Image (spheres, rainbow, N blue to C red):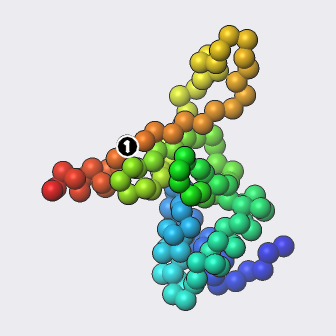
Amino acid sequence: MERSTTQRAAIRAAFAATDRPLSPQEVLAAARAQVPTLGPATVYRTLNALAAAGTLIPVTFPGEPARYEVAGKKHHHHFFCRLCRRAFELAGCPGRLSRLGPPGFRVDHHEVTLYGVCADCGAAAGAE
């Protein structure tokens, strides 16, 4: 059983306030709104503990540090903004990707990631 601390509550609140995978830096920035003295080491320790407990799951993208999202969600995929480096959840799944496997192969899992520019970055680029 993990100890309930103000720092952990602020970190959990960061995930409750958003519905997308967060980097440790994003968690730190959000949680510091409640606990200004929160340090990066506490965030990393807590993320690791919550992931080990199955409360959070890591979301990885090639060449990027792990982000984390709340465990227990329905199967979904992700969008990664190549400008701001934020990750977003995509609703649903394109379905039956097993048909893309080579003949005779059995697909038992898949992950789909779309890469591009998020709405915020796209709007900022359009304003320039």
Residue 120 location (% of width, % of height): 31, 55
Q: How many callouts does the rendering have?
A: 1
Q: Quadrant of residue 71?
A: bottom right
Q: Is residue 33 above or below residue 74?
A: below
Judge whether residue 10 can be spotted in this image.
no
Answer left or right for 125 relative to 90. Answer: left
Q: Quadrant of the C terminus?
A: bottom left
**Three-letter amino acid code of the residue under disc 1:** Gly
Residue 26, horizontal then vertical, whole percent? 49, 68
Q: Mark 1 = which residue?
A: 116
Crowdedness of circle 1 by 10 Å Cα count: few (<14), some, many (20+)?
some
User: Which of the pair 20/114 is nearer the observer?
Assistant: 114
Name the spot of residue 127 as percent of width and height, x first: 16, 56
Give the residue at x 27% y 50%. Answer: 122
Q: Residue at x 62, y 16 (%)?
A: 99
Q: Quadrant of the N terminus?
A: bottom right
State which quadrant residue 116 falls in: top left
Residue 50 visible in the shown view: yes
